[in-house]
Amino acid sequence: MGVKKKKEMQVAALTICHQDLETLKSFADVEGKNLASLLLHCVQLTDGVSQIHYIKQIVPLLEKADKNGMCDPTIQSCLDILAGIYLSLSLKNPLKKVLASSLNSLPDFFLPEAMHRFTSRLQEELNTTDLYSYRKVTDNISSCMENFNLGRASVNNLLKNVLHFLQKSLIEILEENRKCAGNHIIQTQLMNDLLVGIRVSMMLVQKVQDFQGNLWKTSDSPIWQNMCGLLSIFTKVLSDDDLLQTVQSTSGLAIILFIKTMFHPSEKIPHLISSVLLRSVDCTSVPEWFMSSCRSLCCGDISQSAVLFLCQGTLAMLDWQNGSMGRSGEALLLDTAHVLFTLSSQIKEPTLEMFLSRILASWTNSAIQVLESSSPSLTDSLNGNSSIVGRLLEYVYTHWEHPLDALRHQTKIMFKNLLQMHRLTVEGADFVPDPFFVELTESLLRLEWHIKGKYTCLGCLVECIGVEHILAIDKTIPSQILEVMGDQSLVPYASDLLETMFRNHKSHLKSQTAESSWIDQWHETWVSPLLFILCEGNLDQKSYVIDYYLPKLLSYSPESLQYMVKILQTSIDAKTGQEQSFPSLGSCNSRGALGALMACLRIARAHGHLQSATDTWENLVSDARIKQGLIHQHCQVRIDTLGLLCESNRSTEIVSMEEMQWIQFFITYNLNSQSPGVRQQICSLLKKLFCRIQESSQVLYKLEQSKSKREPENELTKQHPSVSLQQYKNFMSSICNSLFEALFPGSSYSTRFSALTILGSIAEVFHVPEGRIYTVYQLSHDIDVGRFQTLMECFTSTFEDVKILAFDLLMKLSKTAVHFQDSGKLQGLFQAALELSTSTKPYDCVTASYLLNFLIWQDALPSSLSAYLTQQVACDNGDRPAAVVERNTLMVIKCLMENLEEEVSQAENSLLQAAAAFPMYGRVHCITGALQKLSLNSLQLVSEWRPVVEKLLLMSYRLSTVVSPVIQSSSPEGLIPMDTDSESASRLQMILNEIQPRDTNDYFNQAKILKEHDSFDMKDLNASVVNIDTSTEIKGKEVKTCDVTAQMVLVCCWRSMKEVALLLGMLCQLLPMQPVPESSDGLLTVEQVKEIGDYFKQHLLQSRHRGAFELAYTGFVKLTEVLNRCPNVSLQKLPEQWLWSVLEEIKCSDPSSKLCATRRSAGIPFYIQALLASEPKKGRMDLLKITMKELISLAGPTDDIQSTVPQVHALNILRALFRDTRLGENIIPYVADGAKAAILGFTSPVWAVRNSSTLLFSALITRIFGVKRAKDEHSKTNRMTGREFFSRFPELYPFLLKQLETVANTVDSDMGEPNRHPSMFLLLLVLERLYASPMDGTSSALSMGPFVPFIMRCGHSPVYHSREMAARALVPFVMIDHIPNTIRTLLSTLPSCTDQCFRQNHIHGTLLQVFHLLQAYSDSKHGTNSDFQHELTDITVCTKAKLWLAKRQNPCLVTRAVYIDILFLLTCCLNRSAKDNQPVLESLGFWEEVRGIISGSELITGFPWAFKVPGLPQYLQSLTRLAIAAVWAAAAKSGERETNVPISFSQLLESAFPEVRSLTLEALLEKFLAAASGLGEKGVPPLLCNMGEKFLLLAMKENHPECFCKILKILHCMDPGEWLPQTEHCVHLTPKEFLIWTMDIASNERSEIQSVALRLASKVISHHMQTCVENRELIAAELKQWVQLVILSCEDHLPTESRLAVVEVLTSTTPLFLTNPHPILEFAFCQVDASIALALALAVLCDLLQQWDQLAPGLPILLGWLLGESDDLVACVESMHQVEEDYLFEKAEVNFWAETLIFVKYLCKHLFCLLSKSGWRPPSPEMLCHLQRMVSEQCHLLSQFFRELPPAAEFVKTVEFTRLRIQEERTLACLRLLAFLEGKEGEDTLVLSVWDSYAESRQLTLPRTEAAC
């Protein structure tokens, strides 16, 4: 929002050599007016920008000279020096362009001399022999050719020399590159030089005039010889795969350009290039010079990349326009296409794939150019039905979901171009109904909407043929696209398509329809679906529509805003009326029309579609609506409303008074948001508002300063600027007051995060003014001692985010700690920090780190620390603050190291003592924190830092040595028994003594007898610790047993390792390195870096604890990144050496190896990850290639049992590498080999190999198909087409096919066993994630057809799950049109009832395949399609032939169930397709057969078996679904009468099986819910009327929880008036007794039943209340019991579902009990947020107390609430005196959002309002005596406890201090109110800002005369 300052231009100053400087001095005149003087002044300046001014004066000065000036030696020398200056400037220096521009205007009579001087200077440049200066010369040649006449002329003059130089330089650079192999930094530089040399060579050929003629085309011409030499070099570069592909690509361009320039005659060029591309060059027919220069292209085996780059050169360098190359050019174009298509099936390297896609897109551009030149011969070859366009479409469909964005973009270009190509081939005809376009459109629309490429291609189609033709096919397409916008991955594509479509539609309608009538149709098509989504869509859907689609729609059609607002306002008014009549309406998850309105207005204002904010408030939305939006229950409505206030397209728009009031209102209730995303948005929007205030205040300030007396002409000056500025200042001060008040004791994390973030934004936006810039507000002016202390206390938060925000805010303040703290307090802070740094609670050391950093940067350290400095830092320069920070940091680090050294010594004696009393990781963390804040590249005290760094490294190694035995133990977590009682202390001591000094694992080889008499006392520890003046003593002199757990010891060890690793990584990353040991620069020596590397290697390869090696990995990554950028070759090669070393160790499988083969290879994968991920991505990734080759070789199957461990390591490492996102697409070429290793490894007899193979396979599935984005395992969001899959991984096609064949042959054999081929699971897991492609049906080498028979045979597997997977996997391999035939074929393989021998497994697999194919077929076809109905009819006929499988003749219930499922699916499909016509099923006699199946089933005859028959539940569910369908079908046929059915709902409900009852009840419940919600067309079906009695009987005897719950839900949906009177004669309970029975259930049952029973009981209560209006005393007892039930259901321990049910119940029933059903509240019948709901509730309570005249009994209770429970203070006291027990990682339930004082604040406000408004006073003093006495006692206790706290208690006793502070606030609030009641205290002294919020409290309850919003 804020205006960004323009970045100042940085220009390097030009310089000249001493000789030229002396020359200028000798020619400079005394007056300083000649050219020499001008240049002398120029070169003596040190500012490049100033020099530009002088350069521009050169030509004007020369223009004044006459023609005789040519002979002036001064001018000649100056021109010579100017030439030297030009050639000495770097290519990107602006001075070079300025000088060239100036010299282009040189007077003509000076040009010959200037050209001579430039030519001679350039010749000197060309004579250079220094290889590393070649780049500068090449850049000069390039710059001479770019818009510089003198330079171009000079190059023309020296063309032979320039070409010779380029040839020589390229040869030498190539040779030097070969010599520097391994030094990738030097090689990268050389390759860039090589690239520039090739480009300059091309530039010469394209721009130098001499090449346009033929004079140089003789074999003895030097130019020709140089050209041949360069062509030979380019050919060599093209074939050198060790060079960067960018260099090879440019060589391909250069080769074609040189051939085009050199070959004669030009008519034969296309044929020559075509033969090179097709590798069919006739060596006898090509010129000798071409053979000698390009022999490898003519006779050699050209690599794929070389052919690819030659194709690129062909398309880019030849002239395809105007048909200039004739028929041979057209042939070359077609040949190039075929070559590219061949390459596309061979190339799999990601970078080459990217090149290929660009080149294919370039080919389509060239094809369009050729077609535009009216080439009739190409029409047949390039129209939509041609093979080339078909191949292009295949490429598009295969790659349109490629992971690389750039490649997907190329597919869009290709698709767009091939549409254009087809249009050009049918030019002149009406191309809209063209079959190609029609078929293409229909095929795209048939695809699923989850395919991203569909959106792109549809967008191109819309632009080509118009949206009206697509809408004619399906007018619901806009709604369909909006529906998918809940998926974030699809949103950008969907919104772009919608934009393309509505733009095209509007243009079409405007051209077709007269006047403005078209807008209504456009709104109906595009705006109405949008409004529906905004009001009714799910949360994600709305958010993405608002962010992506709505701005585009309003930007294109701003006039639609009025239409949208009108519709939404009407909807809000209608909804408000409904809610007042029916308060239960409105879902808490719904944003509704209000949210939609706010979103529309917000977007409109942010994009400038509203004239002014004032117009918005006055004309579009009311004050009440704004407030309602700011506290709406739905977070996005609040955000959108806030955005409407804060965002504006003008950064200087004045913030109105109303906006400021609303913002203040918003902040009061929205800081404690539980959603991180909402908090971030709030803070971001408020920062935009502050920027607006700052920017507009600058305008106002300028207006105020100007003395203009003109009348105001615009909104900026509607009131005097000084008034607006004062309003701004008051507003910002008020905001800060609110934010600091929010940092009260006990405030939640979210509140603190929000408040501190907003305060940080204020400090950043309204920074301290520099110079004369006016700032309307400064946060520092509002900081006092109390607020400073509040910010300091934020360091005690357990959330580091809060610490960071508080620290950053304190650093932004101009006042420092010294302003607010005395030296004693600062000394206490330092001591507290040291004490916290050794706390056993990990987050305490983080607090200590921030405290120490704060004291360092505030220069507030104790003076005693200065003794640690031996050298005083010089602070007299301008960098004084940095010097002071460096000095302070050094002192603190030395102090911490001194403490750490003693503690490490203690730990070496007893690790147990260290874990119990001084875990060392805190000290290291503080050292790291201090170093991170320091700029380590500009240190002044280098001599002091060197020994500190050296000592720090040694200390780190020493500490690591102490703790590593635990971390490297074979079982670190179980090293010590996990006991939490104090008796375990002696055992811990003994075990730790046994493992000193190293863990040899002896402890685990034999049992140890532990003695009971050993003990460990704190007294001994105190005696052993040497205290120094800067460290803290251990409190407590009494002897107490140290209660230590194994967990504490382990945490001490792994956190110490973690901190050491992070410290070492940071030192490598930030510390400057010494180039040589004797150097005075740098702090880290080469040897130290190597030692750090060895340390990481040891611990990553040997640590067993994940926490240790994961964080060692973080540090090691920093080291490897530094090494790869290091110019020191020995260091640069270290990662490579380490990699080979560890790979050799893995391969050798030495039994003595310390590598961990369990724990997924522990740190080994991390180690290799770090080494490979830090390899430069722009290089050739050689380390990755070699490593992957080695690992895949090791991961393959082996017969040698000794190779098992290397195989496991390889599989685990591969898994880590495939999961590493930093490797990106570079890892993709190895996916196929990885998948092979995983699938083959799954068949290993060794469990470890199978386990690692499974993990690797899981990682590969994620890498191939993406991170799982849907809960449904079979969702299409993580799938791809079979064509795309096998195109990307062609090696898997034969492998999977072969493996599948092997598995299928085994499974289908008579000897098949379940575990014979476990890899079947993995094979099917891959195959089931594939789906059909739009190109299915076309011929392809990667046809999916061969898989089909094998997958079918896998369906015969004895494993149930494998049969299911085979059925799902079969679907994508069968084309949609082939599904009916396949189903019929499968059905024909089923046995007939007369067959004697058949396998049920085979039958089951076949039926599952039929079921899934039928399901896919029904989902993919339109119901009205006649072919669809015909095919289904044929399938139905085939199904009837095998109906015995659904009857009792089939003994297997599992296969019977699946067959019944198929029948049910057929009924659904055919009934849906028939619509209102005569049902197909009836005409086929299908229902008659179904009725026969049901009649003969066990549902009618009963079950002869026990309940444990396999498949019984599945069979019952399938049969019940079919029976229910039959009942509905019969009822529909006979006019809703239950006739001619084999079974009724009553019979189903009486089934003995809960599966039957549950499904039946579910079906009936759907009907009742539809009727209750108004969605049913005719209400409840007649078939279900009068079933109340049946449900009552069921409710009494149902014992299955799920069924019982559904019965209660049905009763709740029904009208109690229908069934409640029947209870007495039906279930022998009166209506009251039934109510009591229901309430008893709600009191005793589990959560779901409890909530349903509560809703039912409440509905019955409501019925009684409405029927007993005159005599409600009759149900008083039941009403009382119901109230108690509601209260019990609100308790905290109950599930959320139960408490939400209470909310719903109260919302629906409360109006029946109120004396006034419509209470007068500002936010009545609004969905409000919980924070303001609390304030509203208290406001209503106080209001009702006054209305009912119940202040006397009510006030003591409210004051008691204010004071809190008496147990609170007792608990606080106990916590202060009890022995603290450390239970790390205790997972007790914590409420991070609870804020006690918020309740106190609101209650205090409303009590004060109540007392002030009513004027009530207690009738007698005794009335409040009990409370006064209690409050006085609490005051005394609090005072005593505060005195007992140690210094800096807020840091060292945070929990206790916070509890006391909260109780203090409550007590003070109660005291003030009591004093007010007694008249002893004025109204202005109440705590908690009572008076400040009095007006706000008044807003919540309005006078009776006002109406609600």
Image (cartoon, rainbow, N blue to C red):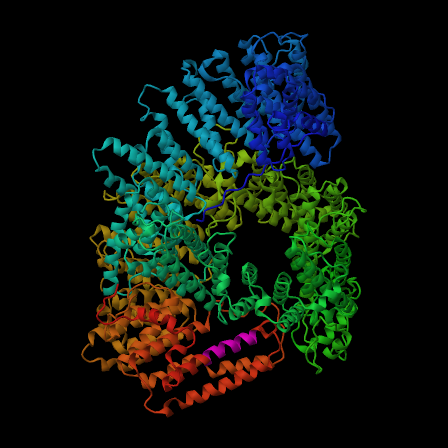
**Quarter of the image where one finds residue 149:** top right
Q: Quadrant of residue 235?
A: top right
**Residue 1441 at x, y percent in the picture:** 36, 42
**Prevailing secondary structure class for the magenta stretch in the rendered image:** helix
Q: Among all residues in the image, which is located at the extreme front?
A: 30
Q: Quadrant of residue 249?
A: top right
In the displayed structure, 1873 sits above or below 1233; it is below
Q: Is residue 1865 magenta?
A: yes
Residue 1283 seen by the camera = no
Q: Can you say which quadrant of the picture contains the C terminus?
A: bottom left
Asked if one can make out residue 1179 in the rendered structure from this viewpoint, the answer is: yes
Residue at left offset 74%, top offset 48%:
1082
Q: Which residues are magenta?
A: 1855-1867
Task: Tell which of 1285 and 640 is nearer to you.
Answer: 640
Q: Position of residue 702 (x, y in %)?
A: 41, 50
Pinpoint residue 1255: horizontal percent, then vertical percent: 61, 50
**Is 433 on the left or on the right of 889, as rendered?**
left
Is 906 colored magenta in this rendering?
Answer: no
Is 1798 or 478 nearer to us in this picture?
1798
Where in the figure is residue 1109, as x and y percent of width and height?
A: 68, 55
**Picture residue at 60% right of the left edge, 17% below the top:** 69
